[in-house]
Image (tube, rainbow, N blue to C red):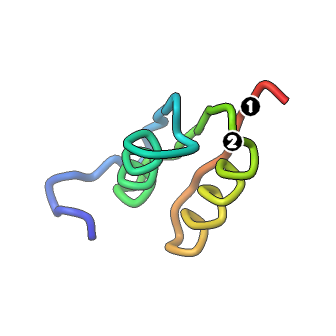
């Protein structure tokens, strides 16, 4: 659920450590608020899951990883 005053449409956010924990939660919150999120982390499988979860709620998220 997005707060009305937390509108990030048209913004881009880069979240490091987004594969798990707090980073994942922040990435999802930013995506749900309208930002296009570039998620980075070490666990590629978890990043792919994050991208799928964001897409399921209509949010924009892509991943970047060292592998």
- Report x, y in % for residue 3: 18, 62
Q: Quadrant of residue 33?
A: bottom left
- Tag 1 secondary structure: loop
Residue extending farthest right: 67
Q: Is residue 27 left or right of residue 63?
A: left
- Front disc: 2 or 1: 1
Q: Nearer the viewer, residue 18 or 43?
A: 43
- In the picture as drawn, the residue positioned furthest to the left comes out as 5
Q: Tell me: 30 left or right of 50.
A: left
> Which mark, residue 65?
1
Crowd tier of the residue under label 1, counting other residues whose Cα lies within 10 Å: few below 14, some 14–19, many 20 or above: few
Which residue is drawn at the image coordinates 75% and 43% (left, top)? 44
Q: Residue 36 appears at what percent x and percent y?
A: 52, 46
| Image quadrant occupied by the N terminus | bottom left
In the rendered image, the vertical position of residue 37 relative to residue 15, given as above or below: below
Q: Secondary structure at mark 2?
A: strand
For the point 37% across and 45% down, which residue is it? 26
Most distant residue in the top direction? 66
Q: Which numbered tag is attached to residue 57? A: none
Q: Which residue is mark 2?
A: 63
Query: In this picture, is 47 found above or below 65?
Result: below
Q: At 66% from the left edge and 48% from the top edge, which residue is drawn? A: 47
- Across and down, in percent, residue 35 comes to 44, 47
Q: Residue at x 85, y 30 (%)?
A: 67
Q: Are marks 2 and 1 in contact (CB under 8 Å)?
A: yes
The location of residue 17, given as percent across then percent down, is 52, 32
């Amino acid at each position: 659920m997005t707060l009305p005053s937390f509108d990030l449409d048209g913004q881009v956010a880069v979240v490091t450590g987004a594969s798990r924990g707090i980073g994942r939660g922040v990435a999802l919150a930013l995506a749900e608020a309208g930002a296009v999120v570039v998620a980075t982390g070490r666990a590629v499988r978890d990043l792919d899951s994050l991208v799928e979860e964001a897409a399921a709620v209509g949010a924009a998220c892509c991943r970047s990883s060292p592998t």
